Amino acid sequence: MKFLDLLSIIAGNLSRRKGRVALTAIGVVIGTAAILVLVSLAMGLQKSATASLYGIGDLTLINVSPGYNMEEGMMIMMSSSMDSGPQTPITSKSLEDFAAMDGVVAVIPRDYLMGGITLKYNRLEGGSSVMGVDTKDLSILGVTASEGVLNLERGTAIIGSQVPLNFYNPRMRPGEEMPAPPELMGKTIRAELTKWDQEGTPITKTIQLTVAGVLEESRGESDWTIYVPLEDVTAWNEWFQGKRINRNREGYNNVIVKVADVSQTLDVSDQINALGYQSYTPQSFVEGINSFYVVLQVMFGGVGAIALLVAAIGIANTMAMAILERTREIGLMKAVGATNRDVLSIFLGEAAGIGFIGGLGGALIGWAGGHIIQILGLAYMAQQAAESGGGPPSLSVYTPSWLVIFAIVFATLIGLLSGIYPALRAATLVPVKALKYE
């Protein structure tokens, strides 16, 4: 039997019993729509959760700190090892070990300024955290410039987008308006370092810094940080401490390890921890969130699958009843030359057709239902946010095209599987007995 002839027979048989087919397909429609809506809701919540992580940072970066010998329980706070320094300092040899790991493309030591600093520009003063990084190009840290460049040179600085907000007029009179944040791009600011001697007398050191670039807002650490070359911060910290810093003995306070691909981040982080260092990457947090929502998707999909299982029983029942009603028809088909395979194909095709019709209807209803839920949910959450003064709502129902296709194919497959037993019964009927039925 040709494939087109088979499709024609299947379509004709289904159209003869429109009411029964429609009632049977309703169960598939409900199950498919439930799967589509629930999984779309879970995927939308996952998308909203990951979108809310805006500013969490470049997922290919690993933040590495020295390893400490931590005691268990409350003894952590009393451990003498914390007073004697890190058990595993990050030395120059450590940097070589990190760089030798598979997937690592850059190892960037960095250090904070360990002392008081006052920034001055014209009549304004301010403060900010100062970080030295051992790289000539800050773009490797996943930041972008809104003004200027990302190249760091001696005597220059690249500032975060919020740093100008820290400046104020220390001589402002009562009733006087607050000065606007200064435009620091390309300007020279004075950094006044202050330390105290044994008698408590302040000692100051003034440094001129030219702002070479301003970073785009990231809602992260970089927004409030001033970046300068690591050698500058090292020299300033040596001035604060009154001694030279030996990196091979004291090590670095912090190192950024950049990997080539996000998929390698956790593996490299585990390797670093195995060496005795402490590492953190935003990717571990994102992986935890994704794992939670994957489980949620499976649970929601399982609820819809139960409805499809009930629909499958309905398809099997409908096909079994159809065999009883069409026994003589089956005998006649076999009498005129139809093989067991032909009869099997016809009944399996009818069962799969019911599943396809129900899957198609369920996909349309599920897609429309997801949009309705999103509209109503956003309206309700917007009203609640307006009353409580909270932020904008973030409910999302996300239905990718592959999910719609999967739902239709899955419903068709369920129909096909449901029709196996009735189809086998029809195919194995003896023609003589079938013709004599009733």
Image (cartoon, grey):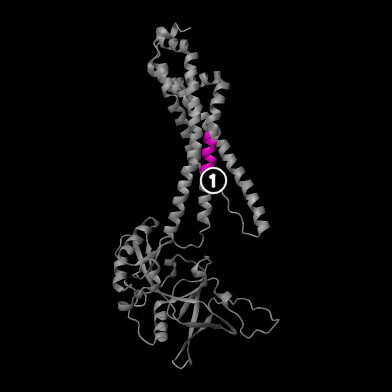
| In this view, 120 is above or below 397 | below
Q: Does residue 105 appear left or right of residue 143 in this picture?
A: left
Which residue appears at 54% of the width and 70% of the height?
161
Residue lying at the far right in this picture: please name it: 175
Magenta residues, start to end = 31-40
Question: Residue 341: where, in percent of width, then height?
Answer: 38, 19
Question: Residue 12: where, in percent of width, then height?
Answer: 52, 19
SS at circle 1 = helix
Q: Does residue 166 appear left or right of residue 230 in this picture?
A: right
Question: Residue 336: where, in percent of width, then height?
Answer: 42, 9
**Amino acid type for the residue under numbered disc 1:** Leu
Which residue appears at 44% of the width and 61% of the height?
282
Indicate the quadrant where residue 155 lies.
Answer: bottom left
- Taken as a whole, is the magenta stretch helix, strand or loop? helix
Report the label total: 1
Give the quarter of the figure containing the N terminus.
top left
**Badge 1 local density, few (<14 within 10 Å), some, or many (20+)?**
many
Name the residue that disc number 1 marks.
41
Camera-nearest residue between 265 and 389? 389
Q: Give yes or no for residue 37 being in the magenta stretch.
A: yes
Which residue appears at 40% of the width and 7% of the height?
432
Q: Does residue 333 appear left or right of residue 377 in this picture?
A: left
Which residue appears at 35% of the width and 84% of the height?
244
